[in-house]
Image (tube, rainbow, N blue to C red):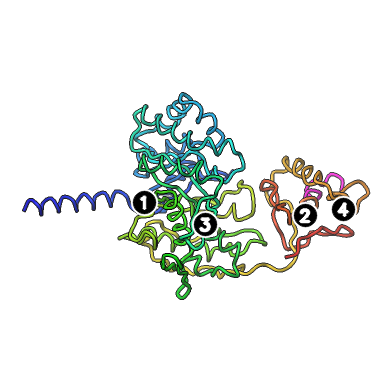
Amino acid sequence: MSLLLHLFALSLLISVSGAKFSGRPGINYGQLGNNLPSPSDSVNLIKSLNAKRVKLYDANPKILAALNGTDITVSVMVPNELLVNISKSASLSDDWIRSNILPFYPTTKIRYLLVGNEILSLPDSELKSSLVPAMRKIQRSLKSLGVKKVKVGTTLATDVLQSSFPPSSGEFREDISGLIMKPMLQFLNRTKSFLFVDVYPYFAWAQDPTHVDLDYAIFESTNVTVTDPVTNLTYHNLFDQMIDAFVFAMKRLGYPDLRIWVAETGWPNNGDYDQIGANIYNAATYNRNVVKKLAADPPVGTPARPGKVLPAFVFALYNENQKTGPGTERHFGLLHPNGTQVYGIDLSGKMEYKESLPAPDNNELYKGKIWCVVAKGANWTQLGDALSYACSQGNNTCDPIQRGGPCQKPDLTVLHASYAFSSYWAQFRKIGGTCSFNGLATQTIKDPSYGRCEFPSVTL
């Protein structure tokens, strides 16, 4: 009888701890927009999505105050620019915790503290070498200041892997493997934390849509599988394949059991004309399917770790209009800035979706001419600097808008900027030039040329 009671107590403990640590994904709350709802409204919107976890990219006091007293667990981030100094100074680390965590803890359920964002993808060697020392300093500060239950980690992009296919070949880059990853994994293992990874099947598919099946990338494939020839594990979606590459990379360094947390995953609902597959249909399909997989009870896990909970944050809460880079960067949100859903989504994994989604119209590469012009709503006071930058890159980029040129229109800065953006992009796209200009520019397939003024274009 005592054995039965012991087993019952043990099973109760397991079920209670299992309920406590659910696989239901949370949400990334980015703030790079000038039209976003207030923190308190945002917290209500997070609740409306049935998210029980939220990840912030800083320690915004207004957001942490708005989360006070809720049952939402919170991940906060130490900004990249502070890492080098924190890695060298215990007192600076203590001060950061005192200023940013103690005023809100424990009534705001801060549970994860991420030291920097995708540091190992940046070129700064001093920053990279400061990462693990900074993580250790922050961990010691939490302990010395009596902050318990907070795990320390950092986020990694998939470019930290030198090899990822097949998954069993997963291996960290040579430049970081021994010097940074080994001590990092040792730290995460010792503190019972997680390896936080950003996993985007969208980008893996978009880089090679000819050889990677779209349905395999959005969890819709019924007949496409990938079998790892070394392990004989069979994969039915790209997400699992990418996760398991990290599993094997950690195993190579002697940490086969360290837990993984998906710090970001998602699919863009819109993008530029030269970006394939960024649309509402694919975004809704991917995010609904990944939520269903992650929230499954009992947990599904991955082929290398079947039945294991895989905690995650979906990216992102809002479409953020001030994010720089390609158009997809501004269109990962589950919500529009006015708080309405881009498409029906619920993070509990239990919702049945009956709405019909708009048919995708860009699952194949666009073929034709594209121009780069000033975006609607662009800040006119910033156009002058962007115009100067575009014209300062050489190659006679802006000759036609100089005095006497066929495109010269005195006092029409917007027209001049559009010409300069298009000319710059047409000349420098092949070596990495983008149609972005810090969000001031956008792509168009409507020819902006007029009279004798012919705007340069990119032809896909």
Q: Earlier in the sequence, mark 1 or mark 3?
A: 3
Q: Position of residue 312 (x, y in %)?
A: 42, 52
Q: Mark 1 highlights which residue?
A: 257
Q: Position of residue 217 (x, y in %)?
A: 51, 65
Q: Amino acid at mark 3?
A: Tyr
Element at badge 3?
Answer: loop
400 relative to 310 in the view: left or right: right
Q: Position of residue 396 (x, y in %)?
A: 86, 50
Res. 200 mark: 3
Q: Residue at x 78, y 62 (%)?
A: 447
Q: Is residue 417 magenta?
A: yes
Instruction: Give the CA distance from mark 1 to mark 4.
Output: 63 Å
Q: Earlier in the sequence, mark 3 or mark 2?
A: 3
Q: Earlier in the sequence, mark 1 or mark 4?
A: 1
Task: Write the start and end of the magenta stretch as one range.
Answer: 408-418
Q: Earlier in the sequence, mark 2 or mark 1?
A: 1
Whether residues under marks 1 and 3 lie with C-beta atoms below 8 angstroms apart, the answer is: no
Q: Residue at x 59, y 52 (%)?
A: 330
Element at badge 1?
Answer: loop
- Nearer the observer: mark 2 or 1; the answer is 1
